[in-house]
Amino acid sequence: MSEMPRFQAGDRVRVRRASPPGHVRTPWYIRGHSGAIERLCGAFANPEELAYRRSGLPAQPLYRVRFRQAEIWPDYRGQPEDSIEIEIYQHWLEPAEQAP
Amino acid sequence: MGGLPAGPVERHEHDYALWEKRVDALMVLLSAPERRLLKVDELRRNIEGLGADAYERMSYYERWISSITQTLIQRGVLTIDELGRKMAEVEARGPEGHQAADDAV
């Protein structure tokens, strides 16, 4: 029992900007930022539900999403192409316009 | 915590105290498929529930044992009364009692 994947490798996505209470695995610092799907990792029971002893089903597709470091950290001094990859569940992602 | 300003990451390995190894073992045993008394997601939720300053106030395994305790109380595996009595019993042994218990392992 799992949700159908909505995205595929290369798709541009934006991480939802939301701050619900409770246990959330989506890092706070990445919310509201855009990146590209690097791969689909599979589907896993939703940790936001597992944390409260519920089943977490249907399983949520989990993606590895690649972001540019320079777009995340205002004072980033590394190479402009440096990236960071974060695993994010599908319900935290929405389609974003294609990269310029 | 993730994304907040902090100093450099300490990269050196350190030795773990016997109690820290026991906390690690406790987590493995409680979450084993034949018991399922604790999920890692509950462990994380209850660590977050310790409050933001827990990261400065407590060591890694102190956060773990506090979180494991919370989870077992929430699930009804332990009662607060049982826990309080046992903690008093262990304290009453004094430092020498602790040592004897550690040596017996």
Image (cartoon, rainbow, N blue to C red):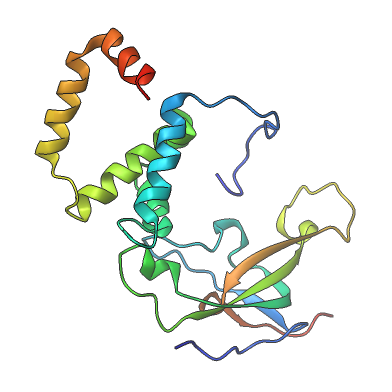
Residue A22 visible in image? yes
Image point (41%, 27%), residue name? B19
Of residues A5 and B94, which is closer to you in this image?
B94
Q: Position of residue B35 (x, y in %)?
A: 31, 58
Q: Position of residue A57 (x, y in %)?
A: 40, 81
Relative to A10, B48 lies left or right: left
Residue A4 position (above or below residue A38): below
Residue B44 position (above or below residue B6): below
Image point (36%, 60%), residue name? A22
Of residues A13 and B98, which is closer to you in this image?
B98
Q: Position of residue A84 (x, y in %)?
A: 75, 59
Name which quarter of the figure residue B18 lies in.
top left
Of residues B40 and A26, which is closer to you in this image?
B40
Image point (41%, 67%), residue name? A48
Relative to B36, B78 lies left or right: left
Relative to B43, A15 lies left or right: right
Residue B42 position (above or below residue B88): below
Query: For the image shown, how many numbered marks are present on the structure?
Result: 0
